[in-house]
Image (tube, rainbow, N blue to C red):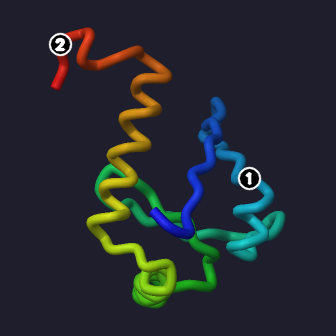
């Protein structure tokens, strides 16, 4: 998937999530700034509060178009990342007889 790089972080006890500095800088997210959290199936989208849902959707489409990424590519990439994370956390699914 061109133009995307996955980052790893951990959710802390009180639900706090550290967003890597590089991502904060690219997204213009600054200390104390409010954000909008949008559930997308099994994923979430975090945007600066200044973006409304419709504007966020338009921006996502523009970014994906510039990067040459389709929704299918994005979902495929998410499945790959979930599989890697599952394997790192729990071991090989196939060895345990899971689909």
Q: Position of residue 3 (x, y in %)?
A: 56, 69
Residue at image mark 2: 97
Q: Is residue 29 above or below residue 64?
A: above
The answer to which of 29 and 63 lies nearer the viewer is 63
Q: Which mark is residue 20?
A: 1
Position of the N terminus by quadrant: bottom left
Q: Is residue 39 above or below residue 34?
A: above
Q: Position of residue 80 (x, y in %)?
A: 37, 44
Q: Is residue 75 above or below residue 25?
A: above
Quadrant of residue 48 within the rendered picture: bottom right
- 27 left or right, relative to 74: right
Q: Residue furthest top?
A: 96
* Residues packed near mark 2 inside 10 Å, few (<14), some (14 to 19) or many (20 plus): few
Q: Count the marks.
A: 2
Quadrant of residue 92 within the rendered picture: top left
Q: Position of residue 31 (x, y in %)?
A: 83, 64
Identify the secondary structure beneath mark 1. Answer: loop
């Amino acid at each position: 998937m061109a133009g995307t790089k996955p980052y790893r972080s951990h959710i802390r006890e009180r639900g706090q999530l550290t967003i890597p500095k590089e991502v904060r800088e690219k997204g213009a997210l600054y200390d104390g700034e409010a954000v909008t959290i949008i559930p997308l199936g099994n994923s979430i989208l975090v945007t600066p509060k200044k973006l409304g849902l419709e504007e966020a959707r338009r921006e996502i489409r523009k970014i994906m178009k510039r990067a040459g990424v389709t929704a299918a590519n994005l979902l495929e990439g998410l499945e790959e990342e979930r599989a890697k994370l599952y394997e790192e956390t729990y071991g090989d699914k196939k060895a345990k007889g899971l689909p």
